[in-house]
Image (cartoon, rainbow, N blue to C red):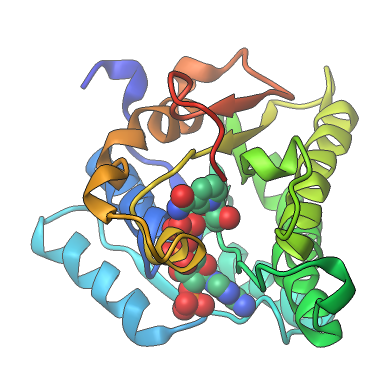
Amino acid sequence: MTANLSLSGRTILVTGAGYGIGREAALTYARAGATVLLLGRTQEALNDTYDLIEQEGLPQAAVLPFDLETQDEEAFRELASLIEQHFNHLDGVLMNASILGQRTPLESYDWNTFQRVMQVNVNGQFALIKHLLPLLRQAPADASVIFTTSSVGRQGRAYWGAYSVSKFATEGLMQVLAQELENTSQIRVNCINPGATRTSMRAAAFPAEDPTTVTAIEDIMPLYLHLMSPTSKDTHGQSLDAQPQRAPSA
Ligand SMILES: NC(=O)c1ccc[n+]([C@@H]2O[C@H](COP(=O)([O-])OP(=O)(O)OC[C@H]3O[C@@H](n4cnc5c(N)ncnc54)[C@H](OP(=O)(O)O)[C@@H]3O)[C@@H](O)[C@H]2O)c1
């Protein structure tokens, strides 16, 4: 690993760290030397990620069970305060947690599912970044915020409903925040579109697809590491593809 890709001494929060891309990103950041704060809904899954980090002898992680759907603003405030007490500041945040919702026409889209998807994928991220920004401002060097988008967040697609709408909102959240921080802070803000990646969300969206034809999670990690490390110091307000060579899929 080049010195600039090192995350040694950095503290990075990863949402949705119990499964899929979030788990792999947490491992990638820990292997680069970071202390990773593992946030997600399912405690056992977070514990499994914690154990994987432990087994490799990497910097000890922390498990933060937190449901982005059901918490009120006070809970987000308390979460930030807990992180500050134990870690003082944050050097990076990967906003990765999302839910897929239904694949159905808007006309028949379930009301409650629409609210849930927007709550987890958009409102939860707004609340998190609102309360974590003061911790990112306290980072001793550069800090990085990565949001997770999708091809259907750049070009609307039939039957992708709330998920597609929520990813447009994610791009918007990133752009608004990036402009607000322009030239006034050492915090850079970007989006990653992972592209089709072999996870349970992908399998749920494309049940007939042969998973072995889909890119393995490890293969998209170079962009996740680059954007979190000082090598990307000058990248700000961008929406980048982890698989630029592949046609848009989801
Ligand atoms: N895989 C792809 O092909 C693909 C393509 C484009 C974009 N993406 C995006 O990449 C990101 C990761 O997706 P993935 O494929 O790795 O999906 P995944 O395996 O389903 O993982 C989603 C993660 O989000 C967490 N999560 C869901 N609801 C939550 C809540 N209410 N509170 C806290 N955490 C919650 C899940 O944990 P719990 O189950 O414990 O809640 C899980 O760890 C998502 O933003 C997704 O939209 C994926």
Which residue does the image show at 35% across and 56% down from the upper left? 209
Q: Is 223 positioned to the left or the right of 54 in the image?
A: right
Where residue 103 appears, as percent x and y from the top left, is 66, 67
Of the 4 image quadrants, the one containing the N terminus is: top left
Q: Is 30 positioned to the left or the right of 89 in the image?
A: left
Where residue 199 appears, as percent x and y from the top left, is 36, 59
Q: Which of 26 and 59 is in front in this view?
A: 26
Q: Is residue 11 above or below residue 176?
A: below
Q: Which of 190 and 214 is in front in this view?
A: 214
Where residue 45 appears, as percent x and y from the top left, is 34, 78
Q: Which of 208 and 205 is in front in this view?
A: 208
Which residue does the image show at 31% across and 28% down from the upper left? 6
Residue 86 seen in render = no
Where residue 79 appears, as percent x and y from the top left, is 65, 74
Of the 4 image quadrants, the one containing the C terminus is: top right
Q: Which of 148 and 93 is in front in this view?
A: 148
State the image quarter where residue 216 is shown.
Answer: top left
Which residue does the image show at 79% across and 67% down from the upper left? 105
Q: In this view, does 231 lie above or below 57?
A: above
State the image quarter where residue 226 is shown.
Answer: top left
Q: Is 27 positioned to the left or the right of 194 in the image?
A: left
Residue 132 seen in render = yes
Which residue does the image show at 56% across and 62% down from the upper left? 97
